[in-house]
Amino acid sequence: MRKLKKNLLAVGMLFLMGTYSFAGETYTNEDAKFKITFPSSYDVSSDQQDGVTVLSLSATYQSMILLVSVFVYEEVVPEDEYAVKVAEGIITTADAFNSKFNEKKCVRWNGGGSNPGLKNAIKGKVSNGSGGSFNFFGNIYITMAYGIEYRISALSTSKKGFDAGIESAFVNSFKLL
């Protein structure tokens, strides 16, 4: 009986360690119609380029890099083009991280509700600008709503540093307004 209690306690502790609900900082943008909670402070920047405003948010937490990129297009993207935009975003992001795109690892994701999106694994290497490079492991999530494209990334520079619990809490905090 004592051994059973000890094992149940150990299993319970493992479950709790894998369950995160950080009470971080929530970013809300009424114009871009979304909100997301970061586990720590975050940086925000905005850039206007070729008919699109790109809103970028980033934070580091423990060994994770958490990113959000929102693309607000001047010309409204029709709903029947959402799937093409999402696929384009997945392939572009994989390419940016020198990650091989494997359609078998690309799965459906319902971002922010009933809106169709995709989740894709990222495993790549990017130059650090001084002869070295950084490895990246993680996932990118992309969805569209209101003619706006939303990209959410949870990455780490090592497999060991990637925490699926942090990723899950971060991605699941994303809500469309």
Image (cartoon, rainbow, N blue to C red):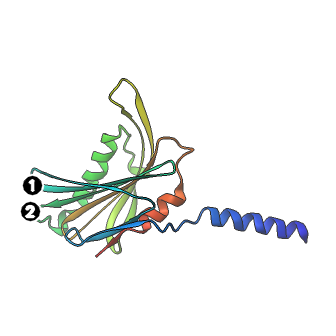
Contact between labelled residues 1 and 2, with CB atoms less than 8 Å apart:
yes
Name the kind of residue labelled 1 in the image. Answer: Gly
Along the horizontal axis of the image, is 78 left or right of 136? left
The image position of residue 154, as x and y in percent, is 42, 53
State the residue at coordinates (32%, 69%).
35
Along the horizontal axis of the image, is 49 left or right of 127? left
- Marks 2 and 1: which is nearer the front? 1
Q: Residues within 10 Å of mark 2 (few under 14, many from 20)?
A: few
Front in this rendered view, residue 104 or 72: 72
Along the horizontal axis of the image, is 34 left or right of 153? left
How many numbered marks, from 0 up? Answer: 2
The residue to which callout 1 is attached is 51
Q: What mark, if any, has residue 80 been given in the picture?
A: none
Front in this rendered view, residue 17 or 142: 17
Does dot 1 land on a helix, a strand or a loop?
loop
The residue to which callout 2 is attached is 75
Along the horizontal axis of the image, is 17 left or right of 92? right
Q: Quadrant of residue 94?
A: top left
Front in this rendered view, residue 154 or 59: 59
Q: Earlier in the sequence, mark 2 or mark 1?
A: 1
Name the kind of residue labelled 2 in the image. Answer: Glu
The image position of residue 81, as x and y in percent, is 18, 62
Q: Is residue 73 above or below residue 162?
A: below
The image position of residue 58, as x and y in percent, is 35, 53
Does dot 2 land on a helix, a strand or a loop?
loop
Q: Is residue 125 above or below residue 132?
A: below
Q: Residues within 10 Å of mark 1 (few under 14, many from 20)?
A: few
